[in-house]
Image (spheres, rainbow, N blue to C red):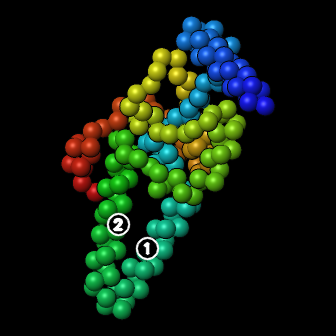
Amino acid sequence: MRWITGLAMAAGVVLVMGLVSQAVHGQDKTVVKPLRVGVYDSRCVAIASVSSEWWNAQIRDKMKEMEAAKAAGDEQKVKELEQWGSQNQQKAHLMGFGTAPVKQWLTPVEKELATVAQQAGVDIILSKWQIDYQVDGAQFVDVTDAIVALYKPGEKTLKSVEAIKKTKPISEQEILKIKD
């Protein structure tokens, strides 16, 4: 019985050594599917997002809160809501004109991203501004228009999206100089 175990172990070692040798000498015939990456211009997504019903509903809710706070004389709440508006305007500028991440503003369409990925034949989706390194031959597929479409944009928004695609992003420093 021991000789069978020894023989099996020897056969396993020979098999592993053969596979290692094939891999080292480029003889491995295993086909590895390259990772396909879907990329999008986050500026376009930001523009579609702030033009969407999702965003408009948030603004309407904040405006109602503001009216109620003013009617109640709640100065603290009014200040908080004004600060929310100011912060979100600045975020919109950083995302819409620069390369700031839009992850939070993908919330209303995040469940549909799997469908976009499947239709585009990609394994992962990320902002094209967030790629720090890529190997030669990496496969990238632009899914910007498919993601923008998830927000159901109107003609005016689509024109803005097309216009922003033709421009370079603005630096964060320049964007922060913009006043509301």
Q: In this view, does 142 lie above or below 153?
A: above
**Secondary element at image label 2:** helix
> What residue would you read off at disc 2?
85
Please tell me which residue is depicted at 43% across the width and 73% down the height of the picture: 62
| Residue 52 placement (x, y as % from top left) | 54, 56
> What residue would you read off at disc 1?
62
142 or 65: nearer the eye?
142
Please tell me which residue is depicted at 57% across the width and 7% down the height of the picture: 25
Q: Distance between the residues labelled 2 and 1?
A: 9 Å
Tell me the quarter of the picture where residue 11 sits.
top right
Please tell me which residue is depicted at 34% across the width and 85% down the height of the picture: 70
Label placed on residue 12:
none
Quadrant location, the N terminus: top right
Q: Is residue 160 visible?
A: no
| Residue 154 placement (x, y as % from top left) | 58, 48
| Pointer 1 local density, CA inside 10 Å: few below 14, some 14–19, many at least 20 | some
| Residue 179 placement (x, y as % from top left) | 24, 54
Tell me the quarter of the picture where residue 143 sits.
top right
Asked if the residue under mark 1 is in contact with the one under mark 2, i.e. CB atoms within 8 Å, the reply is yes
Specify which label sits upstream in the sequence, 2 or 1: 1
| Pointer 2 local density, CA inside 10 Å: few below 14, some 14–19, many at least 20 | some
Please tell me which residue is depicted at 32% across the width and 62% down the height of the picture: 87
**Secondary element at image label 1:** helix
Quadrant location, the C terminus: bottom left
Q: Is residue 34 visible?
A: yes
Q: Is residue 105 above or below residue 72?
A: above
Q: What residue type is labelled 2?
A: Gly
18 or 105: nearer the eye?
18
